[in-house]
Amino acid sequence: MGLASSTLTITDTDTAGTIQFSAPNYSAEEAGGVALVTVTRTGGTGTASVTLQTTDGTAVAGTEYQNATQTLTFNTGVLSQTVPITLLDDGGAAGNKFLNLTLSQPGNGTSLGAQAAAVLWIVD
């Protein structure tokens, strides 16, 4: 009897999941000094990463909030992270203002979800 040979192909279908903001809008009191923003991961295995960045809307970095660019890493089993955004009290009653929150640069096979952008309202 002779030996038979065959080829086995293994396709890796594991992904690092989908990452997005938990809500389209967040709000925090200016006098509170910090806003908490939640980023969630759905599905996937292994390590996933994404970059969160703030940009000016009607609120101006350095005056109403502290500009932030941060890489978030989700290890296996981590489904959400809460990110603090520092708010600056401008001392006046200038009314409510907003800044933009954006997720980008998904890493390790991560996909961005439908909610890859959000708005943070600073309540004066």
Image (cartoon, rainbow, N blue to C red):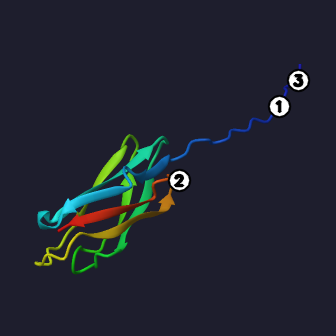
Residue type at mark 2 is Ser
Q: Foreground: 89 or 44? A: 89
The residue sitting at the right extreme is 1
Which label is found at residue 83? Answer: none
The residue indicated by pointer 1 is 5
Where residue 41 appears, as percent x and y from the top left, is 42, 46
Q: Is residue 24 visible?
A: yes
Q: Which badge, 1 or 2, is on the more N-terminal residue?
A: 1
Q: Residue at x 83, y 31 (%)?
A: 5
All told, the count of numbered labels is 3
The residue indicated by pointer 2 is 111
The residue indicated by pointer 3 is 2
Q: Is residue 77 above or below residue 109?
A: above
Label 1: element kind? loop
Q: Is residue 65 above or below residue 78?
A: below
Crowd around label 1: few <14 · some 14–19 · many ≥20 (10 Å): few
Crowd around label 3: few <14 · some 14–19 · many ≥20 (10 Å): few
Q: Nearer the viewer, mark 1 or mark 2?
A: 2
Which image quarter is the C terminus in? bottom left
Where residue 116 appears, as percent x and y from the top left, is 46, 58
Label 3: element kind? loop
Q: Report, in whole angstroms, how far the alpha carbon at label 1 lies from the one at label 2.
A: 38 Å
Crowd around label 2: few <14 · some 14–19 · many ≥20 (10 Å): many
Where residue 96 appears, as percent x and y from the top left, is 23, 69
Residue type at mark 3 is Gly
Write down the quadrant of residue 122 in the picture.
Answer: bottom left
Q: Foreground: 18 or 72? A: 18
